[in-house]
Image (cartoon, helix red, strand yellow):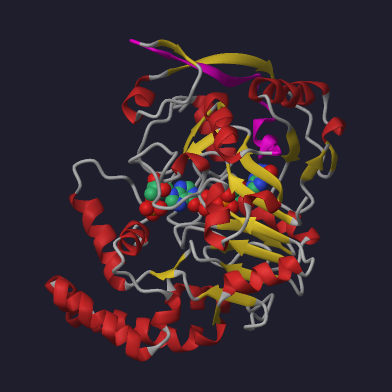
Amino acid sequence: MGNVSIVVGAQWGDEGKGKWIDILARDVEIVARFQGGNNAGHTLYVDGQKVVLHQIPSGIFHEGKISALCSGVVVNPSQLLVEIKKVAAFVQLTPERLWLSARAHVISPWHIHLDSKTETEAAKPIGTTKRGIGPTYAEKANRTGIRLGDYINPIRRQAWYESLSHTTPKFAEHRKAHADQWQEFDQAAEALAPFVVDAEHMVRAQIKAGKRALLEGAQGALLDINHGTYPYVTSSETAAGGAFASLGFSPKSIDKIYGVAKAYVTRVGSGAFPTELKDKVGEHLATLGKEFGATTGRPRRCGWLDAVALRYSGAISGYDGLILNKMDILTGLDEIKVCVAYEHPVHGRIEEFPWDHEILSECKPIYKSFKGWTEELPQGGKISDMSANARAYVDGVEEILGYPVSMVGTGVNRQDALFR
Ligand code: GDP
Ligand code: IMO
Ligand code: MG
């Protein structure tokens, strides 16, 4: 068994990864983000104060732990500097503690412009965060992007400007028209330079020396570029496999893989959502769950827990256990439903999550019903400390999923966590 674990989102993002990575970081020396960029918003509470992290890994508030961004991440340099300043009230980030992969691709003002333009002009917008994520990964795949290691070198950065201006006249126009943005972009390079290292090599060396690492995912399995609800996905590998690829590491050396899911479902942006609720229960989940995006502030769509999607999510990432989060938001509901299969007008009963977004969008949920509870859930302790109906719900979910629920979340703070 290895000393590396992975925590990923099991649904469409915002499951509460930030809080759980903060909790689980207690037991490791390194927390490394493996994909995504500042499209993510990971919320944690430090000494009762809310902090939203977009790029810095969520273990940062534990003293002495190393935070790394691996090759699969895309970095917005000036926003990263803003974030480093933001956390300075709690923790001073020095190059000894924050390792930025020289291989990670850089989000530039051009990529952000392209993302906005594409979304505005599209007949069917994805509903992206407009943070330039898709265009940056596209450029990476096209081998015309710029990596952090090259970006911090003024000569290489200039060469990138020139080569892109050569192939893309509109890029040169953008540089002229938005000189302020490009100046900020250039200045950030100097400030970030001391943090840019061969992060993958350094993390692997630490692991080899016996240190424990936690690999942090952003977004969620159903937004995965390969396995998600394409085209309504993000542009990176959000499932656990993305972690091996980004760090450059043997899957055989992974110890534990956890998926974080809400005890219901939320989704931001467009795309199919079979269990979406537009009724009073949906309102209950949105209001009590404070379901507004941590990055864009957009209202999140809410619905019942979807076990078809979660079985699929478990299959593609191989969870050792599910972290069933925000269970406190279900308290007070008379009846709680879990979608166990879909009904499709042509294909009938569907038990496997369809690859085809059009089919998924035509699916109606088939529910199993559970009794609600009114007792407050315990804040800290064991899953077995919960009242009978809440326990029956967790046991029921576990049975429907076919893999264990290992932890339960009952509030926003570090201590609001129940274990088996
Ligand atoms: P992430 O992107 O997966 O890290 O999740 P977000 O931070 O975007 O969204 C999760 C939201 O739920 C945040 O506002 C958290 O403070 C909050 N949260 C996390 N865990 C719990 C929980 O167990 N109960 C409640 N009520 N809120 C939680
Ligand atoms: P965390 O890490 C929820 C969604 C967007 C959009 C789609 C593509 O906080 O869970 P993008 O900007 O990535 O090209 O947008 O993905 N999305 C998220 N939804 N949580 C996130 O991150 C998300 N990051 C992207 O809303 O539907
Ligand atoms: Mg989030």
Residue at horizontal 58%, vertical 28%?
A: 311
Q: Is residue 325 magenta?
A: yes
Position of residue 61 in the picture relative to residue 365 (left or right): right
Residue at horizontal 67%, vertical 63%?
A: 31
Position of residue 37 in the picture relative to residue 5 (left or right): left
Front residue of 347/38: it is: 347
Question: In which quadrant of the rendered view does residue 345 lie?
Answer: top left
Question: In which quadrant of the rendered view does residue 123 lie?
Answer: top left
Position of residue 416 in the picture relative to residue 309 (left or right): right
| Rendered view: 266 above or below 245 | above
- Residue span colored magenta: 320-346
Q: Is residue 169 magenta?
A: no
- Outermost residue on the left side: it is 169
Q: Residue 204: image x %, image y %?
A: 66, 67
Residue at horizontal 44%, vertical 44%?
A: 299
Locate the C terminus and report the quarter of the image it occupies: top right
| Rendered view: 82 above or below 309 | below
Q: Residue 389: image x %, image y %?
A: 77, 21
Front residue of 214/246: it is: 246
Q: Residue 40: image x %, image y %?
A: 49, 57
Tell me, yes or no, if residue 163 can be seen here. yes
Q: How many marks?
A: 0
Q: Residue 237: image x %, image y %?
A: 47, 50
Residue at horizontal 54%, vertical 34%?
A: 265
Front residue of 350/361: it is: 350
Tell me, yes or no, if residue 293 can be seen here. no
